[in-house]
Image (cartoon, rainbow, N blue to C red):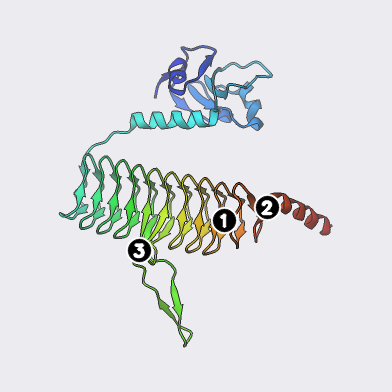
Amino acid sequence: MKFKAKEIADILGGTVDGDPEVTVTAFARIESGKPGAICFFANPKYEHYVYSCKSDIIIVNRTFVPKEAVTATLLRVDDAYAAVASLLDYVTAQKRSYRRYRGLRCRVRLSSKIGSKVYIGDFAYVGKKAEIGGFTKIYEHVYVGDGVKIGSKCIIYPGVRIYPGMVIGDNVIIHANAVIGSDGFGFAPLEDKSWKKIEHTGNVIVEDDVEIGANVCVDKSQMGSTVIRRGTKIDNLCQIAHNVEIGPDTVMASQSGIAGSSKIGSHCIIAGQVGVAGHLTIADDTTLGAQAGVLGNVKESGQVLMGSPAFPLKQYLRCYAAFKKAGK
């Protein structure tokens, strides 16, 4: 990586406040910036670092007005946080190379269809009649079951297990040791108080531009499909049960779980350790705060919920203040 300030401004659609010829070769956090690096400032609580930072370039919002002298060149953009994400993506894309590779110790069944410039690492397995789109990377020790369909430009990291019949879209990233398509937790109680397993005959559909974290489990449906819609991002160590549907562009933080047959709307934010009970519907643009327990339908979009059972944030804060007062 080697860019001048004016080149970065062209990439991000920004303007340079300072030396347009200054060159950077690395990224750095604003609190540990160093010469030759670029960093960004978006959170007001980090403003004091802007004045002491030794980085040569700092990406800031256009509206930022310094209160002290700044030695770094400022690169002004509409949204500093989004701009640095775009720049990181641009740099990564420049480094990425696509080449056909098939490890000597991998096994690819003859009936499978492999696109152009697909990487398949050692000890990976690709089953019968599986399809893998062009420019996809299947890392070492990945299992791709019979009849699986994986789109183009996907990254499947080591140890991922994709059960037979699952469908993965384009530009999907699945991190290490995730399991896509395991049986849902479905058992029928019998008269003798034992449990009879309910077979799951459906699949999982992961649409385009989804990212699934490490050690995530997505269960296949009893019938039909468990669906993760376009653009959804799931953090590590999450559980998606059978027949769940997650709407487009929803984000889900670590250690959260969604029980069977629940439907999550689009553009929702699910914080860490949230639990959603089964057979519920969560409206679009809902935010579920950390450790919230959702026991009923959320019908009104745009709400922020906290607590267990979860209820609106303002009400939760009033109750919490009362709890603290009562404890004194």
On the image, which quarter does residue 187 sit in? Answer: bottom left
Q: Which of 81 and 206 lies nearest the eye of the viewer?
A: 206
Instruction: State how far apart marks 1 and 2 are (Cα).
Output: 18 Å
| 84 over 254 or under it: above or below | above
- Horizontal and vertical percent position of residue 266: 50, 47
Eye-nearest disc, 1 or 2: 2
Eye-nearest disc, 3 or 1: 3
The image quadrant where one finds the N terminus is: top left
| 243 over 32 or under it: above or below | below
Secondary element under disc 1, as helix, strand or loop, is loop
In the image, what residue occupies the spot 43% across and 22% down?
A: 11
Which disc is residue 202 wearing? 3
Q: Tell me which amino acid carries mark 3.
A: Gly
On the image, which quarter does residue 185 sit in? Answer: bottom left
Secondary element under disc 2, as helix, strand or loop, is strand
Which disc is residue 30 wearing? none
Q: In this figure, which residue is indicated by the disc labeled 2? A: 312
Badge 1 vs badge 2, beta-carbon distance below 8 Å: no
- Horizontal and vertical percent position of residue 194: 45, 83
| 5 over 30 or under it: above or below | above
Which disc is residue 273 wearing? 1
